[in-house]
Amino acid sequence: MEAKKIVDALRQALIEEMERDENIVLLGEDIAVFGGGYRVTEGLLDMFGEERVKDTPISEIAITGAAIGAAMTGLRPVLEIQFNDFLACAMDQVCNQAAKVRFMLGGQVKIPLVIRAPVGATGRAAQHSQSLEAWFMHTPGLKVVFPSTPYDAKGLLKTAIRDDNPVMFFEHKLLYGAASPGGKAKTAVDDLNEAFKPAPEEDYTIPFGIADIKKSGNDVTVVATGFMVHRCIKAAQKLGEEGIDVEVIDPRTLVPLDKTTIIRSVEKTGRIVIVSEDVLTCGVASEISAVVAENALFYLDAPVKRVSVPDTPIPFAPVMEQAVLPQEEQIIQEIKSVVYRGI
Amino acid sequence: MDKETALFMYKKMVQIRKFEEKLYQLFLTRPMPGSMHQYNGEEAVAVGVCAHLNKDDYVTSTHRGHGHCIAKGVEINGVMAEMFAKKTGCCKGMGGSMHIADFSVGMLGAIGIVGAGIPIAAGAGWTCKYRGKGQVSVAFFGDGAANEGAFHEGINLAAVWKLPVIFVCENNVYGFSTHYRRTMAIENIADRAAGYGIPGMVVDGMDVKEVYAESGKAVERARKGGGPTLLECKTYRFMGHSRFEKSAYRTKEELEEWKKRDPIKLFEEFLLKDMKLKRQELDEIGADVDREIEESVSFSERSPDPEPDDYKKYIFA
């Protein structure tokens, strides 16, 4: 059956890959008996047994380190970190070990490791709401993946599992589409349009470093990641009614980053707005801005615009949380601010 | 212990000692890249444990890793050339003293972050258990690492998953400059094993016979599915923490006291008195090792430097 939600697409990818290669093992907090905080691994314990689907202690250092040690010696672990915020506990293992072991040892070893982690703000205050992709973009030796559709999620996860390098695989909570066992999880998937492309039940992979143009247009380039892709598509549709033709690009992988597609688009439109859910300073949008400034400055007809969370932790009260996240109306205004014509 | 094993271990200990002494001399007499942390005085630990290991067993090591590499069977030429940052080094000049590894003999690498190798060794142990071929994994670490979160988390994980891992704490009294009595409120790190539900043993880390005996039991238990063990080997480093560090935090008397129990001297006494070996046999081993070390230096001198952009090959597989 085709997967209409990211949770199902990811599960399909895991199942297909685990059936293909018995060296693929899963570990993480509450992933086996409980089925995962966001239900991605639901049912996999029964399918593959406890040697391949392992609940772990709440020990982010140990489970990340153990996943690295297993990857160094021939297994292909897929580690779930329950919230990407908890990666802070495992930073040495991720950034000093996983990212550098192959390098320091002169290429003697491969680290076929995937670390999956949910990102995004859904009313859980500052320690369960961050989007930390940029931390890992800043550490050479890691690949960074962030899908926005079921189709991309499945194809990219399969590529990540087959990759011989550590891959940070970020998943946006509002795009999973799964109900939590305790009730209905907050989700945005019911309001998304055909851009939220389902994953077919077949074996396919999506190569890293190839951006996807989710909507083509001629007036302004919008680069967006994760949930923001969908917010930007909606904004683009409204702006279309006003005669502004927006191109929406989803990089899909931040490392490697498909600079070419972004630069070509800016050469065509002369304008760029970058929308991301991480914080502004040294963020995803900062890096893409720099790429555009270095490679396409003389094509620009307006300043580069970043729309990200201002430099603040995510506040709890819904009214404040929504105030710091890029909203559709704000995105529309920011796009309008760069599409002025003639001077 | 049979004669063959005894002589094998003796030679390994002498290799480590002479390798370290040569390095010290090299650092004093010529510009050598980087720094180093030397293993003199602790030889009995690496050698006593690794004598039980096969090529396909795994070891993780520390910033003080030269001894573990030699004990696990890494070619001395490769280790020395890595110290010289040469292309022929076992890590092709990418790691240096703190990151020596050789996967062909199960040496997963010296790791420069204190305690970080403990969960990685647990993960290697997971692979061993998953394959079910009786392999084991060993984590070497110091007394300082025993206060890292990685120690607690890694040993607990190995205990609850019953992984075939031997956790070998080399308590050499000082974490850099700080005495273990100033960093923990217990005398024996091995006592912590009880908190993980695994066996813990205090071992005389200057006596290779005792290390060999106790680690043998731990390795055997792990191979048979009995899970991990924590061995605390009481030992002492004869050199400073790093390169020319002068150890002002400890007394000469303390150092001399420990040197009376130099692990190589102790083992020589045993070999001569109890195993009736002749002095000449031991001297010949020493002379062989001297030649081997000299050859490793000249091999390193002859070896080419890496190309300036070689690093680009190793960021991603």
Image (cartoon, grey):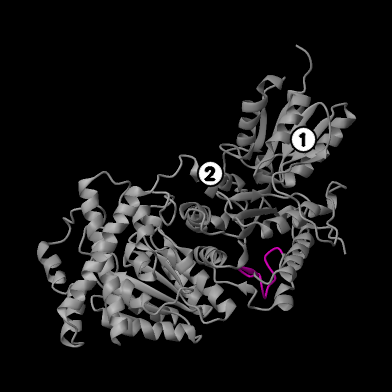
Q: Which residue is mark 1?
A: A329
How far across and down, in percent of the image, does residue B274 sit? 18, 88
Residue type at tag 2: Lys
Chain containing the residue with disc 2: B
Measuring 67% from the left and 23% from the top, which residue is drawn there?
Answer: A303
Viewer-side residue, B261 vs A121: B261
Asked whether residue B8 is in view, the answer is yes
Q: Quadrant of the N terminus of chain A?
A: bottom right
Measuring 54% from the left and 78% from the top, which residue is drawn there?
Answer: B161
Badge 2: residue crowd in 10 Å (few <14, some 14–19, many ≥20): few
* Residue B220 higher or lower than B244, as above or below: below
Q: Which residue is mark 2?
A: B312
Q: Is residue B278 magenta?
A: no
| Magenta-drawn segment | A24-38
How far across and down, in percent of the image, does residue A7 sit? 76, 61
Residue type at tag 1: Glu
Relative horizontal placement of residue A32, taking residue A201 as reference (left or right): left
Q: Is residue A26 magenta?
A: yes
Q: Main secondary structure of the magenta part?
A: loop
Badge 1: residue crowd in 10 Å (few <14, some 14–19, many ≥20): some
